[in-house]
Image (tube, coloured by chain):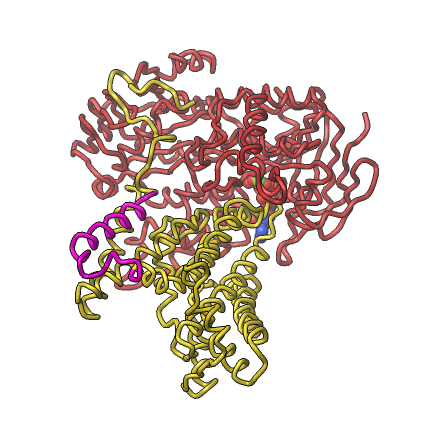
Amino acid sequence: MTNLLELRDIEKSFATIPVLRRASFELRSGEVHALMGGNGAGKSTLMKILTGVYTKDGGSLVFDGREVELSGPRDAERLGIAMIFQEFSLIPTLTVAQNIFLHHEPRAGGFLNDAEAERRAAGILSDLGEDIDPRALVETLSVGACQMVEIAKALSKNARVLIMDEPTSSLSEAEARTLFSLVRKLKSEGISIVYISHRMAEIFEICDRITVMRDGHDALTRSTGEVTMQQLIEAMLGEGVEASMQYQARPISATAATVLEVENLTLEEKVVDASFTIRAGEIVGLAGLTASGRTEIAEAIFGLRRIRSGEVRVDGKPVRGTDQAIAAGVALVPENRRTQGLVLEHSMHDNMVLPNLARFTRGLFVRDGAGRRAANDAIARLKIRTDGPDKVVGLLSGGNQQKIVLAKWLERRPRLLILDEPTIGVDIGAKSDLVEIIREIAEAGTAVLVISSEFEELLAMSDRVLVLHDGRLIKELEREEIATEEVLHHAIQG
Amino acid sequence: MQSKAETIGGLPVRAPRLTGFDWRGYIVYLFFTAVLLFFAVTIGDKGFLTVPNLFNIARNTAMIAVIAVAMTFVISAGELDLSVGSTAALSALVAALVIQAGFGMVAGVTAALGAGLLVGLVNGLFVTGLAIPSFLVTLGMMQFVRGLDMRLTYTNPVPVADNTFNGIFGKGYLFGIPSLLVWSVAAVALGHVVLRYTPFGRQVLATGGNRVAAAYSGIRVNRTKLYCFLLSGAAAALAGLLFTGMMSTARYNYGTGIELAAIAAVILGGTSLFGGRGTIIGTFVGALLIGTINNGLIIMGLDVSEQNMVAGAIIILAVAFGKKPAR
Ligand SMILES: Nc1ncnc2c1ncn2[C@@H]1O[C@H](COP(=O)(O)OP(=O)(O)OP(=O)(O)O)[C@@H](O)[C@H]1O
Ligand SMILES: [Mg+2]
């Protein structure tokens, strides 16, 4: 097979800090090529160079046998290269059709032809097997639907190369399955796909070849059939690093105090009559399909949702509203870091100080030094890849942002820690680190509630798993009862 | 996807309303109708409803409307322009001085537009080139240009004796319709078409809706913003010409406070202060609403202090009613 495109020895620095060092990457026509690597390895940056969003400092790009220079996204578009970005890249205030055809709108005599755009958008979406109203505003769509709109947008430009940057990170199981069959379909139509992900299982499932990046350089390229998981992890993290996601049974004393009691909880939306408890030191997983009400339960415990009936008690005391929840020692790490978890324009240490202002304040003043020390500790402990605690959070790679969200809440040493999809976009090394850290926190006596769509990590952490279906708790499984991921799979289908 | 059962576990849940009529988006029309009705009932017999008075409202609203149309573009792109009032006065003085010096109407109008575009260009370059928030750039510009206005003629008014000019830009009629009304309707029609139906309008909304995403799509966001400031400068210049034509005189203090009235009209009309969402027709009705309130309160015999209080309260109420409840 011939190469459709080659990136050769690409160099890129941001303000003197090198991010890509002689990074090379080849894509054959009609293949699905995985791009892996630790957080901050430079995957997104390399692909943004390929789509003209960033300009390279050195190296060359060969497309279809000819060397080309890209001076902006339009140039890449003309070559048929389209990218689905890791950051949300739709315009929330425009409709689905307007987004799909943004900047290449169908026209009629110099004017926009929205009717035609809607017609063609409906066609593309139904080809994708998606039932999305082209006239709906994007801000009213679910994350999964937005992802599909982004794909439709890429296809509307007749893309020959489609780059997907962690497309499944915010999708449910079912939505991810839809995406996989879509990837296969596009491949069969001759479209070449670059697939960035931290999830081994899906990479082995849908990709033909794998390239691993490490420290801004391509460390390994192999066919999927010729490489083992261990080799990939070594290429990513270095020799001899263990990344294990195995459950370790931990004895939880029967006399441990009950921290959280949820009794007959019914919310205005979704959740009906949920009851469960979590004891100190226990990690409880919450499994279920995407719209099953998991996030709603988490938010209700943290006081963000109106409770219709029932009660939430922490350490025996009823808790209502966020103030009471925080006072009782509840911490919530929200699902969407960019909108709920971080002030993107601020530095890391400012973000760390924010939920802990009381502890970092002396008299009238914020103790910046202590905040910076805490940030440095977190950088070391969570292996956050950054130039230092003063770097603006928005400029860090996706996975590293997620680690900072975690760091900021861990800093509170909470009584009850609720984690909503804590490892979205976090690389394998960091993922097992995080699992380890969460275990340590539990060991120190914190009660933990984890929501996750990734069974592997849910099973690696949880001592007990609650299964939610359509707003109702339908099952409660002790860890020993769950022999394989399959068991959980069946359980959540209801 | 949305047609999922409207009950979960037997309990009814609120279905998301995607297609249903959302009256909040039309609050400005409701308010406008209500205010018209109120004045018609209370002061209908004092001449509020007469054609001359309605023309009067339209005339007095023209400058706000023209500026607010351009302001809709600026705000939709996620920016703000506070310098329009003093720029209007600058253009008025420039036009009057050029005409007074004997260069004729065309030269005067061209010079006025040039002055407006120059201010817009400087605003736009500072905002896009140096990434200074437009609030600050145009706040400074507002004061700088007002100072310039005062210096230009040492606060002396400049009369314009050119009757063609005064007719076209102020006192005249086209087919029985006051020229000021013609100008504002033309501006609204043009603005509406450009914002809704042209690629530029779409680029403005995309830029204000999500700047990064717009740039990733290949839109030149800085250039788009620059064009919005140029448009705003040109509209301010036109407003200055209208002031001059209406009074046959240019004064340094024209347009004082008009930037706030225009912003109020834009927001009342349903344009989002955060960008990405804009409607020119809404803006026009917002401007008419402000003009009607002012006119009605005067006829009711309220003094200036009372007019200010009532007009301010109505603006807050209208925006409050139009706001979507949080979450
Ligand atoms: N615009 C920018 N300015 C400064 N630094 C940047 C910028 N974009 C990326 N970086 C830095 O470049 C490095 C590589 O980032 P990149 O986003 O390419 O990583 P990644 O491999 O995609 O990681 P992840 O898996 O976490 O998404 C990071 O250390 C990041 O902080
Ligand atoms: Mg990335």
Left or right: A121 with respect to B184? Answer: right
Residue B255 in picture, x, y percent from top left: 39, 71
Task: Return the residue nearer the eye: A486 or A32.
Answer: A32
Shown in yellow, the chain is: B
Task: Return the residue nearer the eye: A490 or B76.
Answer: B76
Q: Which of the image's four quarters has the C terminus of chain B? A: top left
Res A191 quadrant in image: top right
Does B50 lie within the magenta span?
Answer: yes
Left or right: A41 with respect to A209? Answer: left
Task: Return the residue nearer the eye: A71 or B280.
Answer: B280
Res A99 quadrant in image: top right
Residue B80 appears in the figure: no
For chain A, give the colour.
red
Q: Which of the image's four quarters has the N terminus of chain B? A: top left
Residue A305 in picture, x, y percent from top left: 26, 34
Which stretch is magenta?
B26-53
Res B71 quadrant in image: bottom left
Q: Quadrant of ligand 2?
A: top right
Left or right: B195 with respect to A75? Answer: left
Residue A362 in picture, x, y percent from top left: 28, 61
- Tell me which residue sits at (42%, 15%) in the image: A488
Task: Return the residue nearer the eye: A431 or A242.
Answer: A431
Question: Is B180 situated above or below B96?
Answer: above
Left or right: B50 with respect to A149? Answer: left
Residue B33 in picture, x, y percent from top left: 27, 48
Question: Is A237 situated above or below A208?
Answer: below
- Tell me which residue sits at (31%, 63%) in the image: A365
Residue located farthest toward the front when viewing the structure as drawn: B175
Does A446 lie within the magenta span?
Answer: no
